[in-house]
Amino acid sequence: MTADQPVPSPAHPVDWDAAARAAGSLAAAGPRIGAREARREAEGLRAAAAASVAHVHRLTGLAAAEDLRDSQVLVVDRPTWSLANTQSFAGLLEPSFAHLRATRPQEYALTTAPLTRRAAALEMGGILAWLSSKVLGQYDPFSALPGPDGVPAGPAGGRLLLVAPNVAQVRREIHVDPADFRLWVCLHEQTHRVQFAAAPWLRGHLQGEITALTGGLFDKAESLPERLRSALAAANPLGASTSLGAGRAGQDDDGAAGPGGRPALGLLGAIQDEEDRARLSRLTAVMSLLEGHANVVMDAVDSSVVSSVKTIRRRFDARGDRRSGLDRLLRRLLGMDAKMAQYRDGQRFVDAAVAELGRDGFNVVWDAPELLPSEEEIHAPDRWVARIRAQA
């Protein structure tokens, strides 16, 4: 190799391109719609995404919502959603893979053998294929991170993905007004986009916590599949906005319960190391805040904005009762019952904090990492309120 030739990127234990292809081929077929209806769905989602920003601004009071030019809004199908997530995973997990290369080079070399990489890709592709049929929307703050080839997968501020076939399928299932449902979904997802625009430090903060957690999982896990599944779950805290707060009154899946009656964290629930548990606790608190805040916004609109908002919420929440046994099993395995708990816990926290401090008083949470609530404070909002008042 000559001096002017680029150094090839080290192989990851997952062949991400193969994982994306596998996800695309394994994904369940979406609803049967013609080309004209597909265009109408995409155009409706783009219009709803644009219209929702002004409502997010009005409801949150966050100035960042006035000029959201830091990221893209993309209307995608299921295979494209999977491809986008493999790109983000590649960038987000690269520091942890680099740590594994440096600390356990012999084992790392075994995990990057062609057959092993293809097997890991098929496993990841299967997980992403299943998730791709569930996700309505996702704000991905990590798409701008460089992947193993050193090239960012998206713009500097991330990207918002709206999965058109899933939005169409769900609103058909619950028989609600298409325009109302699209706007309702976009209110939640655009709130995530505004959160990261209002707190430009947040992406780096989350990246650091996720890298530390996945690095710890790689160090302690015994098998490659366990490492990869755990890392995938840990690395995608914003990934599957599948239920948008479904079951907020407790009528969600009959998910496996963890300590204190809360859903278990799926593959991440096996973490025993105290330091890793502390990292997971911090991540859980941040995600509860982000999801709860987005739910508060989407449920704060009245019938003058989304005319059928009460009907949408009632019917959407009831969908959990019709999930198949396989669907419930996969949700438990991937920790998605815990994801639903994040919506509920976070929404209660935000409601209580805003009631005590007012909207502007609550918004200090976006100013610095040290102002984020802990997991204990998520469940006892008065403690966070007292801490914020003491620092004022």
Image: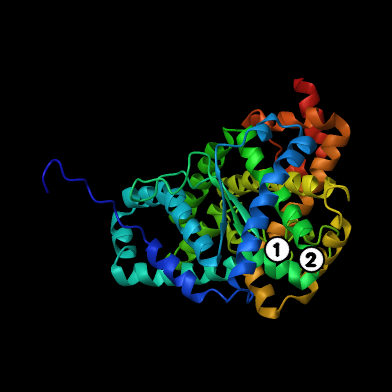
Is residue 190 or residue 104 the one in the foreground? 190
Q: What residue is drawn where x is 80% and y is 41%?
A: 350
Image x and y of residue 19, in percent: 43, 66
Q: Residue furthest front?
A: 36
Q: Say the numbered circle drawn on residue 370.
A: none
Q: Image height check: is 29 above or below 259? A: below
Residue bearing mark 1: 337
Residue bearing mark 2: 252
Residue 230 lies left or right of residue 183; in this view the side is left
How crowded pointer 1 is (Cα within 10 Å; few <14, some 14-19, many 20+) is rated as many
Q: Mark 1 and mark 2 in contact (Cβ < 8 Å)?
A: yes
Q: What residue is drawn where x is 74% and y is 65%?
A: 257
Q: Amino acid at mark 1?
A: Asp
Image x and y of residue 112, in percent: 31, 63
Is residue 69 or residue 19 the one in the foreground? 69
Image x and y of residue 181, in percent: 76, 59
Image x and y of residue 299, in percent: 82, 50
Q: Secondary structure at mark 2?
A: loop
Q: What residue is drawn where x is 88% and y is 57%?
A: 310
Q: Amino acid at mark 2?
A: Asp
> In this rendering, does residue 289 appear at all?
no
Q: Residue furthest top?
A: 392
Is residue 112 or residue 153 the one in the foreground? 153
Residue 4 lies left or right of residue 153; in this view the side is left
Q: Secondary structure at mark 1?
A: helix
